[in-house]
Amino acid sequence: SLAAVGALTLALVAVSAGFVGYWGYHTSYEAPHSPDNELVQYAQPPAEVRPAVERMDRAIRADNGETDVLLYGSFLVDGRPIGDRRAACAGVDGWFNALPFPWYFERSDAAVACSPDIRDFESRESYPPVVIYAAAGSPGDPAFAEVRGRLADRLDGYERYTIRLRATDTPAVVFVDRTTSNGTAERARGAPASGTVPPSSPPRQSTGIARSGKY
């Protein structure tokens, strides 16, 4: 009868709505970044990025230097400089590799400079309140840990946040100067490498790009 067909249709609609509601809740709230979540995009960073970004924003707001953020390494400094985008010195490939950080740089109006290799990095007289290094591969890669430790030796007084830039890989480390992230304008400084002449303060947007190895 028509009444029976109508009742069956309503029951099917109710079951379908309940399933959609549960799945939306599970993928958005219970396990939004789980590898089993089919709605997660490969480039979607996990929730662990948030604490690092909050400290980074605080440090950028407190800083009064010419440069707020330094991107380090050939993974983040890769390709021809790109127009007037924030972090233009990263190059085309480096800019995309650095995502989602360029979005946060735009939001914070951050002045970004780039350091393509360890020689350039260690020759600097001082470092901005935020230094970011990332690499292709898995978080457990020994080469990533080695470079992270070498940077940490230069960035005394910086907090360190090790995160993933993608859902399952692409490890990164965000170093944040404790003094600026705590709301003061004092700049932490790194000691220059022996036998080197420190360059002048990097401009707000770097234009020179040099290529190096994977890390």
Image (spheres, rainbow, N blue to C red):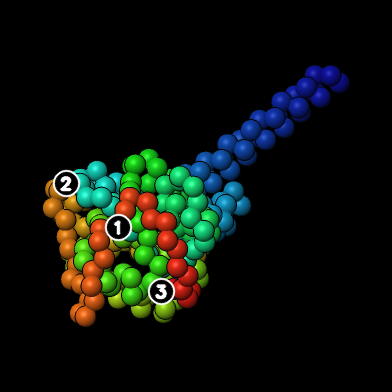
C-alpha span from label 3 to label 2: 30 Å
Q: CA distance from mark 2 to mark 1?
A: 23 Å
Residue at 52 percent of width and 61 percent of height: 79
Question: Is 70 left or right of 170, judged from the image as shown?
Answer: left
**Residue 192, relative to residue 10: is it above or below?**
below
Q: Amino acid at mark 2?
A: Gly
Considering the numbered disc 3 on the image, is that residue within a helix, a strand or a loop?
Answer: helix
Labels 1 and 3: the sequence-earlier one: 3
Residue 97 in sight in this render: no
Q: Residues within 10 Å of mark 3 (few under 14, many from 20)?
A: many
Please state which amino acid type lies under the numbered disc 3: Phe
- Density class for disc 2 (Cα within 10 Å; few <14, some 14-19, many ≥20) is some
Mark 1: amino acid: Pro
Q: Which residue is mark 3?
A: 144
Name the mark nearer the viewer: 2 or 1: 1
The picture places residue 172, in percent across and down from the top left corner, at 40, 64
| Residue 64 in picture, x, y percent from top left | 20, 46
- The residue carrying mark 2 is 183
